[in-house]
Image: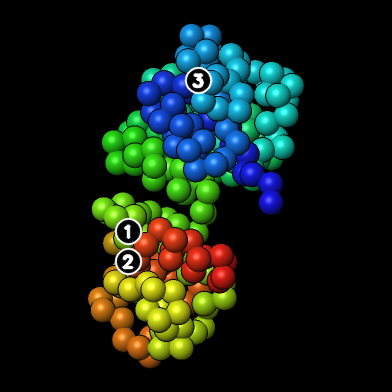
Amino acid sequence: MARSRYAVFGAGRYGTQIALSLAQRGAEVFTFDADPGRAELLKEDVALAVTLDATDKKALMAQHVEDLDAAVVAIGENFEATVLTTLNLLDLGLPRVIVRANDANQERILRSLGVTDILRPESEVAEVVSERLINPNIRGFLTLPDDYEIAEIKAPEACHGRRLADMDLANRYELRLITIRREFEETGDDGAPCVREHILGVPKPDTTIEATDTLVVFGSLGAVQRFLDING
């Protein structure tokens, strides 16, 4: 099975942490930064470290970034460069583009461009970002001692319409379901229809999994991965 291939744009502290975390998980990582010194520091740790102006679309095409599985735009303070790089990557048709936003205004601008995966460095550490990239069904997780974690998993398609009792997570996968986050159609404060997510509390055995559910589970890293491999 071919290794997943990712681009990380911006080799500052945050971008470097993401690149190293991905590489440690076995991914093939390509880092790009306009600063030659930053690119040089990573060349021994990733598949390729290149000095490049990512706002130049032709430069990106020369590196064939459109052939990669996903890209992370982790450029720091230069938001103009972030926007131009993001637009270039979207134009090139990358399957997935995750972009750093330093505040709510930047996040709003990025979402208006069509970006759905936003990073907020103050709340998302590099390990979480790399997990999101490698396992798109994992929306968040908390690492615990002894290789255990609490993971938020987008309900795999194979689970849609199934009862918890029939899934038997504890015996089949050695996972404990903590709760379910579920989307509900509601009326917003302005009177317009909206979708909001709520916690179901402690789910009962006859609870049926819906397509938009997020399962919050406790188990080992291997158990979570096995569940996704079988049902993903």
Is there a contact, CB below 8 Å, between mark 1 and mark 2?
Answer: yes
Mark 3, Cα crowd under 10 Å, few <14 / some 14-19 / many 20+, is: many
Mark 2 element type: strand
Front-most of residues 75 and 149: 149
Q: Is residue 125 positioned above or below 181 on the image?
A: above
Q: Nearer the viewer, mark 1 or mark 2?
A: 1
> Does residue 108 appear in this view?
no
For image coordinates 57% across by 33% down, the residue present is: 29
Of marks 1 and 2, which one's residue comes earlier in the chain?
A: 1
Which circle marks residue 218 in the picture?
2
Looking at numbered disc 3 in the image, what kind of residue is underneath it? Leu
> Does residue 78 appear in this view?
yes
Q: Position of residue 154 (x, y in %)?
A: 46, 64
- Work out how far the residue at label 3 is from the one at label 2, CA to CA, in angstroms: 35 Å
- The quadrant where residue 128 appears: top left
For image coordinates 37% across by 23% down, the residue present is: 13
Total number of numbered labels? 3
Which circle marks residue 42 in the picture?
3
Residue 16 lies left or right of residue 8; in this view the side is left
Residue 163 lies left or right of residue 177; in this view the side is right
Looking at numbered disc 1 in the image, what kind of residue is underneath it? Tyr
Residue that carries the numbered disc 1 in the rendered image: 148
- Work out how far the residue at label 1 is from the one at label 2, CA to CA, in angstroms: 7 Å
Q: Position of residue 89 (x, y in %)?
A: 63, 33
Mark 1, Cα crowd under 10 Å, few <14 / some 14-19 / many 20+, is: some
Of marks 3 and 2, which one's residue comes earlier in the chain?
A: 3
Of marks 1 and 3, which one's residue comes earlier in the chain?
A: 3
Looking at numbered disc 2 in the image, what kind of residue is underneath it? Phe
